[in-house]
Image: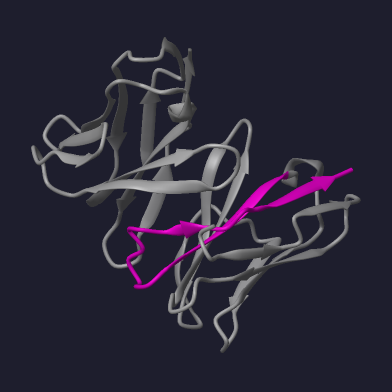
Amino acid sequence: EDKVVQSPLSLVVHEGDTVTLNCSYEVTNFRSLLWYKQEKKAPTFLFMLTSSGIEKKSGRLSSILDKKELFSILNITATQTGDSAIYLCAVFSGAGSYQLTFGKGTKLSVIP
Amino acid sequence: DSGVTQTPKHLITATGQRVTLRCSPRSGDLSVYWYQQSLDQGLQFLIQYYNGEERAKGNILERFSAQQFPDLHSELNLSSLELGDSALYFCASSVGQMGYEQYFGPGTRLTVT
């Protein structure tokens, strides 16, 4: 059974801090890894990672994948209160028909 | 606003009943995905339809079924409801079959009493 594990489960930081969120996975026929941000309701797409070692960046957020060690990290620099959310990691896997497995998320709280 | 619409926003029903959740994808998107999110299980992929055909199946119970209509809207049918089915049900859409970048709707909150 495919597994995606995120750590930590929750994190409280002060504005301006840098945070690193972790996602490790065990899946059959890995295709890609995705990061989502979930604030009040629906998740919003952040990144898709397919190749090892290539950093994806969007503003203060960046992410990288290590396919050998089967993990990904999401970095947020100079955190703001608006970064407070649940960050979800998901992995696409499978040959032919695919599976999408989500981790339970990391709840990030940024306090002023 | 992602462009994906879901109705209803909230639904309260009794055990044993049947409900239908509706989703309209973003204009131009051919794929629709259904997810269940509960506190203990997190976000679980249920099923995907692409251009009217079932494309992938996740952890969907036999009591649940879905379909996608020619106008590309989709319905998720939940029957013989149990207390444990109480959850937030999301629909998402994407352009292609391999929905790497999916746009989520606001969700339907189902409460089974």
Question: Quick one: B81 or B43, which is closer to the camera?
Answer: B43
Locate residue A36, reporting x and y percent: 40, 42
Q: Is residue A102 left or right of residue B10?
A: left
Q: Where does the C terminus of chain B fall, quadrant-wise?
A: top right
Locate residue A40, reporting x and y percent: 60, 38
Locate residue A48, reporting x and y percent: 26, 49
Locate residue B86, reporting x and y percent: 75, 44
Q: Which residues are magenta?
A: B87-113
In which quarter of the view is residue B61 placed?
Answer: bottom right
Is B106 located above or below residue B65 in the figure? above
Is A87 located above or below residue B70 in the figure? above
At horizontal 41% and vertical 59% (from top left) the residue drawn is B102
Is-magenta flag for residue B104? Answer: yes
Is-magenta flag for residue B57? Answer: no
Q: Is residue A86 left or right of residue B85?
A: left
Question: Quick one: B80 or A39, which is closer to the camera?
Answer: A39
At horizontal 84% and vertical 46% (from top left) the residue drawn is B112
